[in-house]
Image (tube, rainbow, N blue to C red):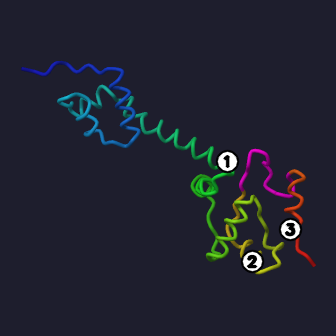
Amino acid sequence: MARPRFKPTAQMRQSVQAMTAYGIPEEHIARTLTPRGIDPKTLRRHFRRELDVGATLANSTVAQTLFQMATTGKHPAATIFWLKTRAGWRERPGGEEGRAAAAKSAHRGEFMHGAEADTPSQVLEAQAPRVILFDSQRRAADPCAAAEEEEARCEELKPTG
């Protein structure tokens, strides 16, 4: 006796799309849809759209979250990751001290060019990767171009002499 014809339900479609988004292989998804499971060919025939868009929708949601984290200025690691993977940025050699100083200054929203460096720590900071973070109040790359509260920070960055 032949199996009854398979009829997908809306709940099954939602489950297939979710499992695809989570990265579960098609063979495993096919085994979970009904008590006896279905053949992977049947899964592909009846759920083609869900299998095609599930991973894309998940990637889109994660990318949106990462983008929001990267653009708030509250998550420097997300900003650095985005710039390296999407904007083609790369780190310049500068040793651990240089990277640590750059991370510290990037977290404060500061940056410095090599010509402005006077002390050894400023030289290391200038050689390290330049990461500029933006926050919701200040969208300028140069901290001196921001609001009046930044003037004190700019005075600290100027060489004394």
Residue positioned 32% across, 26% down in the render: 12
Dot 1 amino acid type: Thr
Q: Residue at x 74, y 77 (%)?
A: 121
Whether residue 97 is situated above or below residue 59 in the rendered picture: below
Mark 1, Cα crowd under 10 Å, few <14 / some 14-19 / many 20+, is some
Q: Name the residue under label 1.
A: 71
Which amino acid is tagged 3?
Answer: Glu
Disc 3 to disc 1, how far (Cα)? 26 Å
Disc 1 secondary structure class: helix
Most common secondary structure along the magenta stretch:
loop
Q: Nearer the viewer, mark 3 or mark 1?
A: 3
Q: Distance between the residues labelled 3 and 2?
A: 14 Å
Percent coordinates x, y for residue 67 in the rendering: 61, 45
Which residue shows up at 72% across the image and 76% down it? Answer: 124
Q: Look at mark 2 in the image and give the residue it sits on.
A: 121
Find out whether residue 109 is within the magenta segment. Answer: no
Q: Name the residue under label 3.
A: 156
In the image, is 124 to the left or to the right of 42?
A: right
Q: In this view, does 61 lie above or below 96?
A: above
Rendered image quadrant of residue 160: bottom right
In this picture, which residue range is highlighted in magenta? Answer: 133-146
Tell me how far mark 2 sits from mark 1, CA to CA: 28 Å
Q: Is mark 2 on a helix, strand or loop?
A: helix
Image coords of residue 90 (percent x, y): 61, 64
Measuring from the top left, give residue 34's x and y in whole percent: 23, 28
